Image (cartoon, helix red, strand yellow):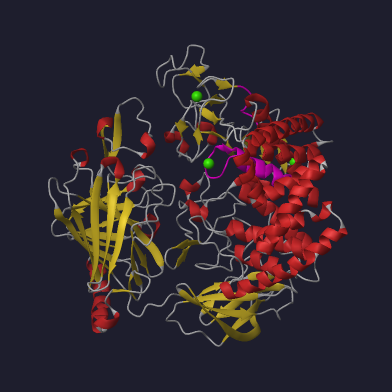
Amino acid sequence: MRKTLLLFLPLLAFAACSGPADTNLKLNDLEYFERQGVNVLVYSNTFSGGFNDEKNSGIEIIHHGVRTVQGGAVRLSNTPEQWDLVPETTVRNVNREDNSIEVGLRYPHYDFDSRLVVTAVGKAVRIDVYLDKPVPAELEGDAGFNIEFLPSQYWNKAYVMDGKANRFPRYTASLTTTRPNEEKVYQYKGYKTYDDRGTGRFVDPLPLSTGHELIVATDDPGRLIKITSEDAEMNLYDGRLLAQNGWYVLRSVLPVGQTGKVLSWTVEPNAIPGWIREPNVGFSQVGYLPAQQKVAVVELDKLDKPRATAEVWRVKDDGTTARAFSGPVKTWGRYYKYNYVKFDFSDVKEPGVYFIKYGDIKTNDFIIGDDVLDRITDATSDVWIPIHMNHMMVNEAYRIWHGEPFKEGYLQAPANTDHFDLHSQGPIDTKYKALQLIPGLNVGGFFDAGDFDIETGSNISVVQNLVSDWERFKPMRDETFVSEEQRYVDLHRPDGVPDVLQYIEHGVLNLVAQAENIGHMSQTLSNSVLDNYHHLGDAAAITDGLHYDPRLKPYQKSADGKSSGTPDDLWAFTTRNPGLDLQAATMFAAASRALTGYNDKLAQRALTQSKRLMKEGTELLAKNPMAARMRGRGFGNMSTNLQLYVCTGEQHYLDDFQQQVWPALDRGPEFAMQAALDAIPYLDEAYKERLRPYVVQYKQYLDSLDTVNPYGVPIGEGNWAGSGSVVSFGTTASFASQYYPDIVGPEYALKAAGYMFGCHPYHNYSLVAAVGATRPKQVFYGNNRADFSFIPGNVAPGVLFRHPDHFENFDDWPFLWGQNEGTIAGNTAYLIFGAALQNLVK
Ligand SMILES: [Ca+2]
Ligand SMILES: [Ca+2]
Ligand SMILES: [Ca+2]
């Protein structure tokens, strides 16, 4: 404590010396409070992301470049979880005269409104909470003002509450209590995040510390924040007691029966005097081909002065280093928060190990060699994809990734169920009754993503991607043992069958079982209860493996040990979507081609379902002209029509495709280029020539991206980061370059690869787990995320845009899915990108 104070005091003294003009928080043009090293955002991001509490909203602090605090809001529990209610933002007013931002918050479920007024006062912000009506009786003691601190940026650091020093716990191990379920505040759609094991009580965390003044990270000036409240007691909680993705929460309960200004906090983030963010030197961690264009993009603090030159150094075989190249640094300009400069070192061509020096910054090393791209999909193909095989035990050397999940199968979802993972069941449209077992569905298929459901649409895409990979590139790689009979997968054990064929087979097994047993495609096979949806760990442990029998009590097993009264069986959401049936029909036809000669019986079953679903889907759509017309418009259906033509040879599908593709290309060649290129192998030379001028336009689009952002690839700004778009951009650019090499060079696809492998905003780590890069990302939102780990080969969504000007990808906190989750459809699309790129540069 004493040491900390001594260390810190000189800093404060130094800060006090600089003039108030550059130390006070000011409301900037982007409507957030700013001083050098500190940004305080007030509802630049509201709680409307789509998945409730995404830990991305409310009052947020970006502290020396890292968003360490968020969630400033009136909340209804001590440590809110993802499915606890979040407030709607009813109004947001920026008042420049008094340097404040006001937001209105509303919980419609409780007809409960509150207002926050955040005012910059010197180096701090004051947060005032106003109520026009008292806290509703049922929320008394539960409604409070909360703010949340990112655990990975604070754990092991000291905090001081009312003069008493303490330390943020690395792992959660503080006290809890239980309360009767009747006192639990309503959760999303009435679902419950917890399993009370029949006790009738829920767990409520108890505070780590209580007081009126909290200073967090007294031992780290970059993270130090002082929070005081004269009128309210503040409690510090560890949200990880209830959910591994919880944050440290500081909270004051709102007083009962009061209106007007009911609570006031002062929050003062420390700023390191003269702080300037370290340059982020973006380059490909996977390395470079000798002859390719090589451009590092350096991200600079807006107060940083660009350097005139940068250097490339060679690491020699004896371990010594020598300068290999020095060249000019060229200014690109401002892109959101930072300035960007570029350093072209294409002249360095000799194979070897190198690093970049930009001023004092020395990057980690990278390889120049003609085989650096050869391994970019190996981890995805050998490890990530087989680990996501459902209904199998998956072993790797000494480790079992998961046992055989969902042995009890899937029940018909009850009618009119509104689900928590964005889908629903309408009236029952199968021969099964609600909660009756639909036989045969517990086979094949792939886990969706960081969760364990089978999203039918995604699984259809998976099979399509894998067939596309197989038919175009014939990958013969065999590193996975798959026995459908044993329901067993062993990684790194060749079994004589190309893995991609086995993955196609595994995807088809589930999808064909859906078609045969349900009669059409389901929407999804998913969890019925929320308290096992958020499962982390072994998929085989999600359910008890026993058939649900409602005649038994919860947690009770039948005498024969085959059923239980625990309602944990997964449900099939069967509501029919003829559009999905048609997609399945084209997928089945393609899969049938790929499987013929390997598994003829399954190939035949797939073809049978393809024909039936195509007929029925077409008839159903014809009966619903509105749906049919809608279907005809989408770009996605361009591809479906092409696939339908390829598998049936019927001219009208080709006519439909041609009717769609040219107008779509006229609107912008980038939107339809992939579908247009996909048709080339099936159409004549005249088609290819007609497409040529669009490829010329497409090349102009590719070049124009260099003026849109410094990285020259499309950077999405949605609520899910955009590496999927970069991958598909790279795939399209690869194929364009393959078919029209005289128009489109390989540099665009390589630019996409460079972005994925480290040349991007925020940090320079590869976005693909364990990809042969020097510095891949270390944490991902896989089902092992609670271990701050990754599943090799995962492709992260990547660098997420936060309004109004911040890009972010946490590499010490895996839990933000929009940055770190990988999906089965996305990761199989990455296989195609990898193969297309490798094919292009060979
Ligand atoms: Ca899912
Ligand atoms: Ca194999
Ligand atoms: Ca069960």
Q: Quadrant of the C terminus?
A: bottom right
Q: Is residue 584 above or below residue 767?
A: above
Q: Quadrant where the N terminus lies?
A: bottom left
Q: Residue 185, located in which quarter of the rendered image?
A: top left
Residue 559, given in percent of the width and then of the height, sits at 48, 11
Q: Which residues are magenta?
A: 439-467
Q: Is residue 119 left or right of residue 43?
A: left
Magenta stretch: includes residue 429: no
The residue at the far bottom in this view is 308
The image shows residue 549, relative to residue 94, as above or below, that is above
For residue 323, side relative to residue 225 (left or right): right
Q: Nearer the viewer, residue 12 or 106?
A: 106
Check residue 443 for magenta coloring: yes
* Residue 590 visible to an observer of this rendering: yes
- How many marks do you count on the picture? 0
**623 vs 731: above or below:** above
- Residue 660 left/right relative to 155: right
Seen in the image, is 89 located left or right of residue 599?
left
Most distant residue in the top direction: 559
Residue at 69% over, 33% down: 619
Q: Nearer the viewer, residue 54 or 267?
A: 54
Camera sees residue 147: no
Q: In this view of the protein, which residue sits in the foreground, 102 or 600?
A: 102
x and y percentages locating residue 319 in the rendered image: 64, 74
Going 30% across and 36% down the picture, which residue do you hit?
203
Q: Residue 736, image x and y in percent?
A: 75, 63
